[in-house]
Image (cartoon, rainbow, N blue to C red):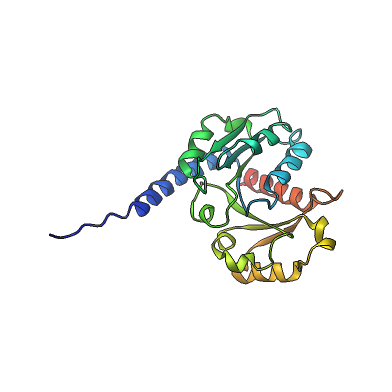
Amino acid sequence: MAVRTIDVRERVMARNDQLASGIRERLAGTGVPALNLVSSPGAGKTALLERTLADLSRTYRIAVITGDVQTQNDADRLARHTDRLVQAVVTNGACHLDALQIATALDAIDLDATDLLFIENVGNLVCPAAWDLGETGKVVLLSVTEGEDKPLKYPSAFQRATTLVLTKLDLIPHVPFSLERAVGYALEVNPDLQVLFTSTILPEGLEEWYGFLRAQLHQRRAA
């Protein structure tokens, strides 16, 4: 008897891409840029968003969707810095967010009263790279406490990103990390990456990041 093979992953991905396309159209219709933050665990996504909300939430209307494998700890941390709803997606073991989860979360967000949307993905440089969430851009974070060769080890995350954010630069004097090599490896994988240098500790450590966000807002409003 003949065997028929059904590629479940292919069908799931096709459905995800269809939903992501709808999300992208929905966001474009309201002019809201959405940034999908991906990184290894502990690279500083939540700390970056905490500072961003604390510093910019009075100027810009910022919505946040955050994903975690088990707890809503990250969402609780972020909620302390904004009076807007922070949505926690607990994946119960899944290593990434998907478009259905984002579409569902968007139902609770008034996009007409939103300037910017952050999606904090699950800490993982493998799975999140492959899943389109309908974002405007994928932002990959790399901390100086990690290896400089992460872009070579996990190329897909860096190839699909539009922006690289190097984090925890305040630790440079204390760790064996070469910024030059890290940036070189990242650009070898993706020559079009925009590279930002940040620290949530140093007084002026987020100026490049904030300039990037303002540029995102300006581009969408001018479109």
Q: Nearer the viewer, residue 33 or 43?
A: 43
Asked whether residue 117 is in view, the answer is: yes
Location of residue 125 by image quarter: bottom right
Position of 73 relative to 127 (above/below):
above
Q: How many numbered circles are shown? A: 0
Q: How far across and how far down the image is residue 83, in percent?
A: 70, 27
Q: How far across and how far down the image is residue 34, in percent?
A: 60, 44
Q: Nearer the viewer, residue 200 or 153?
A: 153
Could you tell me which residue is drawn at 77 percent across and 37 percent down? 54
Tell which residue pokes out farthest to the left in this image. 1
Q: How far across and how far down the image is residue 93, in percent?
A: 50, 44
Asked whether residue 115 is in view, the answer is: no
Q: How far across and how far down the image is residue 12, in percent?
A: 38, 48
Q: Nearer the viewer, residue 66 or 70?
A: 70
Could you tell me which residue is drawn at 59 percent across and 53 percent down? 138
Location of residue 1 by image quarter: bottom left
